[in-house]
């Protein structure tokens, strides 16, 4: 199984939330876990926000950042290039997605197409619009 994680799914590996156990299982059994390069900045922002909201202590945030830095090396990251950003723009217009959600969709689409559109591919996300758009493109989704 190839698993693509958007930031909302990736975050569930570091913060206990609804859906965390399923994401942990998916990643631990995946042959390959991938995400877009932008997810790193989004993760750091989300962990800092969790501290500001009182959901996470500062020392725990530092621990989770160290864990993210260690885990990041094992993730296959999809880099930014002009074609991907242009495709993301098309997705943003077509599906009414926010900017980074459209980037995640374009990256997941690239990974899905690059894998030969296998049945053993799953986009994991917890944003309804992103999941709906992925399904419209024929990409299997785990919410």
Image: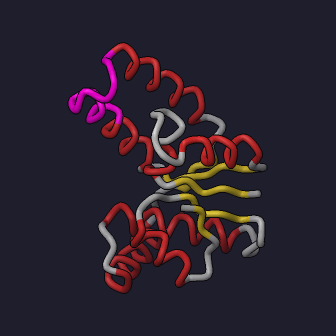
Number of residue marks:
0
User: In this picture, is 95 found above or below 8?
Assistant: below
The residue shown at (69%, 69%) is 114
In the image, 81: left or right of 71? Answer: left
> Residue at the location (43% across, 41% down)?
40
Q: Residue 18, image x and y in percent?
A: 48, 46
Q: How is the image coloured?
A: secondary structure
Q: What residue is at 64 percent from the left and 72 percent from the top?
A: 140
The answer to whether residue 118 is above or below residue 70 is below
Identify the image quadrant of residue 73: top right
Q: Is residue 31 left or right of residue 66?
A: right
The quadrant in which residue 60 appears is top left
Residue farthest along the top direction in this orientation = 59
Place of residue 110 in the rendered image (x, y in percent of width and height, measured from the top left): 59, 69
Farthest residue to the left: give it: 52
Front residue (pair 103, 16): 16
Magenta region includes residue 105? no
Answer whether residue 52 is magenta in the image: yes
**Figure check: 8 above or below 135:** above
Query: At which x and y percent is residue 52?
Result: 21, 29
**Quick one: quadrant of the C terminus?**
bottom right
> In this orientation, which residue lies closer to the viewer: 24 or 18?
18
Q: Is residue 3 left or right of residue 95?
A: right
Q: Indicate the quadrant where residue 65 lies.
A: top left
| Closer to the camera in the image, 82 or 68 | 68
Residue in the image at 62% along x and 48% along y? 22
Point out the stretch of residues depicted in magenta. Answer: 47-58
Residue 76 at x, y percent in the picture:
63, 48
Give the quadrant of the N terminus.
Answer: bottom right
């Amino acid at each position: 199984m190839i698993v693509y994680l958007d930031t909302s799914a990736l975050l569930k590996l570091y913060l206990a939330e609804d859906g965390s156990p399923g994401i942990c299982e998916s990643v631990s059994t995946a042959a390959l876990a991938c995400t877009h390069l932008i997810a790193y900045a989004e993760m750091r922002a989300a962990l800092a926000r969790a501290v500001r909201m009182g959901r996470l202590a500062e020392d725990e945030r530092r621990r989770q950042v160290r864990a993210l830095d260690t885990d990041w090396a094992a993730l296959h990251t999809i880099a930014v290039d002009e074609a991907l950003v242009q495709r993301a723009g098309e997705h943003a217009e077509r599906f009414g997605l926010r900017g980074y959600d459209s980037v995640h969709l374009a990256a997941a689409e690239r990974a899905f197409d690059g894998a030969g559109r296998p049945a053993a591919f799953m986009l994991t996300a917890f944003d309804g619009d992103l999941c709906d758009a992925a399904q419209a493109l024929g990409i299997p989704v785990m919410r």
